[in-house]
Image (cartoon, rainbow, N blue to C red):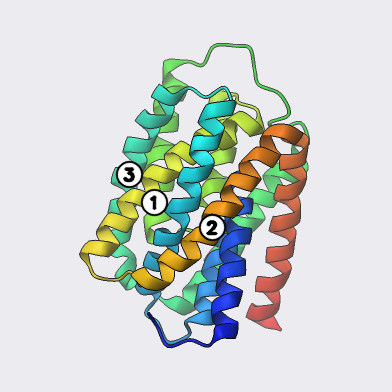
Amino acid sequence: MPDISMTVFIMLCVAAAAAGWVDAVVGGGGLLLLPALLLGLPNAHPATVLATNKAVAIVGTTGAAVTYVRKAPVNTKLAVRIGLAALAGSMGGALLADGIDKDAMRPLIMAALVVVAGVVIFKPGFGAAPSTAPVSRQRILLAIGLAGLGIGFYDGLIGPGTGTFLVLALTALLHLDLVSASATAKIVNVCTNAGALAMFAYQGRVLWQLAALMAVFNLAGGMIGANMALKKGSAFVRWVLLTVVGALLVRLGYEQWG
């Protein structure tokens, strides 16, 4: 357990709960949790921060995935195929994470947020309803390669926004509505978290005691978020996505240039 104050510990637990809720609704809970860990553990190595983030996030993501599978129409077989590719990609990314410069993380996260915001704002009908047209084999293979290997590699290397990128990619490639895409993304995200966490654990990077305590709050937030997304639908998911992205851009921009 790192030597941190009670105030910092409470802040990290609140961030974990909020991240679990956001991750379940729109993905990208790491965009809240990773900055909180960077702030709360200023002297920790970036790989240790990323590793602890993964150990917390996998618990909430798993809880949200179980909730979605029980209540939402999900092609579990396809989600697992994409997830296995994502697991391999995330292990590769985690293997290279030791070389990540802590100061380089913030601009990369901001660039990712701008891309997400642009897609959602300029395509207001994006993910509003699923397409009735069958999905081609080429699109399925592209989803496995892009949403699986590609985004999985990003998740292991950096992480924040992975769930959101998965939702966007799965919506675009497989013609899903945002709720179904969120449900599918949770299954894939469990695999990316597992792959990266396995590599980080092998390297001895995880702060297990801190992660275990934060994971309880992350799990609660994730299950609450999944149930709210299922009840309120795609319009709710879209507005939460835009709100979260906008708030984080303002905060990270202030930290970068303020």
Residue marked by disc 2: 218
Q: Amino acid at mark 1?
A: Asn
Q: Reading the chain from its start, which is encountered first: label 3 or label 2? A: 3
Kindly check if marks 1 and 2 are in contact, taking CB atoms under 8 A apart as contact: no
Q: Amino acid at mark 2?
A: Asn
- For the point 55% across and 65% down, which residue is it? 33
Query: Which one is in front, 6 or 2?
Result: 6
Tell me, for residue 87, which label it has, or none. 3
The percent position of residue 241, horizontal first and vertical second, equals 70, 49
Q: Reading the chain from its start, which is encountered first: label 1 or label 2? A: 1
From this viewpoint, is residue 119 visible? yes
**Quadrant showing the C terminus:** bottom right
Image quadrant in which you'd find residue 51: bottom left
Query: Which one is in front, 104 or 191?
Result: 191
- For the point 38% across and 60% down, which residue is it? 157
Q: In this image, 241 relative to 61: left or right?
A: right
Mark 2 Cα shell of 10 Å, populated few (<14), some (14-19), many (≥20): many
- For the point 41% across and 76% down, which residue is it? 101
What SS does tag 3 mark? Answer: helix
Residue marked by disc 1: 193
User: Mark 1 to mark 3: distance in Å?
Assistant: 8 Å
